Image: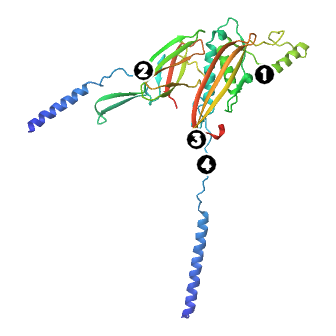
């Protein structure tokens, strides 16, 4: 009996330790726009700054043991983002957002523009543009720069109310 | 040994003295206690984000709506080649004089047009020239003093006349109210702007901003 218990506990310990050798359970790529406190702001990016829209939970066995499992909860998906130019030569950013939920969703978007040196150009509040996305549908958020020196953008998305 | 009735009298008197001072003390202490009166201290004023909707907002036009509509119109005008893509910068009159409020929402129209004009002037950077018609009286008075020799001609060039306007902003604010379940009110707002060619009378640019809000009705917007 003691022998079997020893073998069983050895097997259990070995499998547990083998799980520890992998640093993190590898999941698919994190969703576009996922932002946490350590996320660095990159130029020409879309950031979802509201945890209600995109959130990544990390859990471990009994809260502290073994490899960490990351689970992403997301209401929206940033399908595409692109930079274009208007007929008057101003940059315009276009972001395609899909609502994954079964109910209509209201989100708000705001763009910060930067010049070629990555210095911000907006020096006053430009407000939030509301986008109403029906259930399981896609809508487009677009906003143009007002300055001809605009080169890069950062789009912030949050849940509206 | 004093007689018993005197002893009784003395004891009663001393008890009375003792109790009366106790009663008086209790009355004094009770007068010092506070009564539960609702006199809550007010909150000091604080700055809030004017670009975002706040908890006290209702179904009318709020600061965040003014910011949103002016920003949309600015970008729309800057993106129109008939306005901002001309070889010679056009002269524009952008003020609230032809912005008509046909809705029931109380709003200071200058809040929208001032914000549009100032930020558009800053962004256009010379691609659009704005004419200040509301100050025309002061301009004509100064020109009269210059031409009559009361003052010198200044440091800029002299002209035969003040600037004529090429395009003028016109607009309408409309609203439609709805009442649901007796206490929930909704209001649909539509704000339209157009630029009119002041020579031909044609419309060279136009855009629309519309939104709908619902809430328990606020007395300020009735």
The percent position of residue B120, horizontal first and vertical second, equals 66, 18
Residue placed at 10% from the left, 35% from the top? Answer: A4
Q: Nearer the viewer, mark 3 or mark 2?
A: 3
Query: Which type of secondary structure does the marked residue at label 2 adopt?
Result: loop
* Nearest the eye: B40 or A78: A78
Chain for disc number 2:
A
Which badge, 1 or 4, comes first in the chain's sequence?
4
Residue placed at 59% from the left, 27% from the top? Answer: B211
The Cα atoms of the two marked residues, 1 and 4, are separated by: 46 Å
Q: State the residue position of label 2.
A: A32
The Cα atoms of the two marked residues, 2 and 4, are separated by: 47 Å
Q: Nearer the viewer, mark 3 or mark 4?
A: 3
Query: Which type of secondary structure does the marked residue at label 3 adopt?
Result: loop
Q: Are marks 2 and 4 on the same chain?
A: no
Say if B126 sits above or below A34 in the image: above
Q: Are marks 2 and 4 in contact (CB under 8 Å)?
A: no
The quarter holding residue A144 reads top right
* Nearest the eye: A113 or B133: B133
The percent position of residue B72, horizontal first and vertical second, equals 60, 20
The Cα atoms of the two marked residues, 1 and 3, are separated by: 43 Å
Q: State the residue position of label 3.
A: B183
Label 3 crowd bin: few (<14), some (14–19), many (20+), radius 10 Å:
few
Residue B11 in sight from this viewpoint: yes
The Cα atoms of the two marked residues, 2 and 1, are separated by: 50 Å
The percent position of residue B105, horizontal first and vertical second, equals 67, 32
Q: State the residue position of label 1.
A: B134
Q: Are marks 1 and 4 in contact (CB under 8 Å)?
A: no
Residue placed at 58% from the left, 87% from the top? Answer: B10
* The label number, if any, that marks residue B41 in the structure image: 4
Query: Which type of secondary structure does the marked residue at label 1 adopt?
Result: helix
Label 1 crowd bin: few (<14), some (14–19), many (20+), radius 10 Å:
few
* The label number, if any, that marks residue A9 in the structure image: none
């Amino acid at each position: 009996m003691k022998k079997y218990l020893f073998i069983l506990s050895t097997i259990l310990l070995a499998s547990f330790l083998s799980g520890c050798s992998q640093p993190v359970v590898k999941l698919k790529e994190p969703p576009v726009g996922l932002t946490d406190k350590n996320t660095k702001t990159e130029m020409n990016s879309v950031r979802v700054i509201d945890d209600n829209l995109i959130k990544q939970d990390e859990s471990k066995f009994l809260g502290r043991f073994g490899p960490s499992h990351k689970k992403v909860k997301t209401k929206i998906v940033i399908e595409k983002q692109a930079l274009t130019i208007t007929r008057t030569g101003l940059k315009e950013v276009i972001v395609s957002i899909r609502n994954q939920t079964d109910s209509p969703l209201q989100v708000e978007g705001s763009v910060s523009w930067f010049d070629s040196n990555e210095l911000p150009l907006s020096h006053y509040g430009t407000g939030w543009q509301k986008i109403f996305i029906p259930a399981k549908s896609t809508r487009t958020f677009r906003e143009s720069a007002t300055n001809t020196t605009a080169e890069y953008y950062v789009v912030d998305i949050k849940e509206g109310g | 040994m004093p007689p018993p009735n005197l002893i009784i009298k003395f004891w009663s008197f001393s008890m009375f003295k003792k109790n009366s001072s106790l009663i008086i003390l209790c009355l004094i202490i009770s007068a010092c206690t506070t009564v539960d009166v609702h006199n809550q201290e007010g909150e000091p004023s604080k700055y809030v984000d004017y670009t975002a909707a706040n908890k006290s907002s209702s179904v009318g036009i709020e600061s965040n709506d003014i910011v949103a509509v002016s920003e949309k119109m600015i970008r729309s005008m800057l993106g129109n080649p008939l306005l901002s893509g001309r070889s010679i910068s056009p002269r524009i009159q952008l003020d609230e004089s032809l912005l008509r409020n046909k809705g029931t929402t109380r709003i200071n129209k200058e809040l929208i047009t001032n914000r549009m004009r100032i930020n558009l002037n800053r962004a256009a950077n010379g691609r659009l020239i704005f004419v200040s018609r509301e100050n025309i009286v002061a301009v004509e008075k100064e020109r009269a003093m210059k031409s009559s020799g009361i003052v010198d001609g200044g440091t800029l060039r002299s002209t035969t006349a003040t600037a004529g306007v090429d395009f003028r902003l016109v607009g309408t604010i409309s609203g439609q109210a709805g009442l649901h379940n007796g206490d929930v009110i909704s209001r649909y707002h539509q704000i339209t702007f157009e630029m009119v060619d002041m020579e031909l009378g044609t419309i060279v640019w136009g855009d629309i901003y519309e939104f709908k809000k619902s809430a328990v009705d606020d007395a300020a917007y009735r």
